[in-house]
Image (cartoon, rainbow, N blue to C red):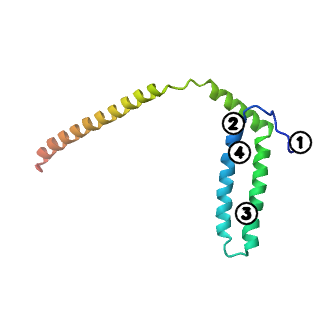
Amino acid sequence: MSINRIYKRGQATYTRLGTGIGVFVLILIGCAVLYQHLANQSILVQTLVPAAVCVVLSWLTFWVINKPAVSDFLIAAEGEIKKVSWSTRHEIAVSTTVVITVVILMSIGLAVVDLFFNWIFGGLIGLF
């Protein structure tokens, strides 16, 4: 495989693009931190070292994303995501309302039971 050839071009384009952008953002953050750590060096070293690291890691990311094993995994992952049946906005709203209501009711119920046991055991021990 050639260095600048994209493996299975056109397949899992958005998955590869999202992965590449995510990794590139992490690389940029790391290079910014490296730039700050090199503050006591000359401006040439402080600038060129993070820039070189950024270029090398970006090329490495492109290379890894286009390796057949990684590309096949990303293609398969995108295929599986397309098979998922996503809930509608209404279903999510109803489910969220049910969960929040149950949590509030359970909290109130546990608070009542806790107060009841406090009252019972406080009376038995003589602290009430």
- Position of 90 relative to 127 (above/below): above
Residue type for callout 3: Pro
Q: Where is mark 3, residue-wise? A: 50
Residue 2 location in percent, x, y?
89, 42
The tag earlier along the polypeptide, 4 or 2, is 2
- Structural distance between the alpha carbons of marks 3 and 4: 19 Å
In terms of image quadrants, where is residue 73?
A: top right
Residue under numbered circle 1: 2
Q: Residues within 10 Å of mark 1 (few under 14, many from 20)?
A: few
Q: Say how many tags the image has.
A: 4
Q: Is residue 61 left or right of residue 93?
A: right
Of the two numbered discs 3 and 2 on the same chain, state the one appearing first in sequence: 2
Looking at the image, which residue is at 78% across and 61% down? 52
Q: In the image, 95: left or right of 42?
A: left
Q: Residue at x 62, y 24 (%)?
A: 83
Mark 2, residue position: 14
**Gap in Å between the C-alphas at discs 4 and 2?**
10 Å
Q: Out of 103 and 31, give the one closest to the viewer.
A: 31
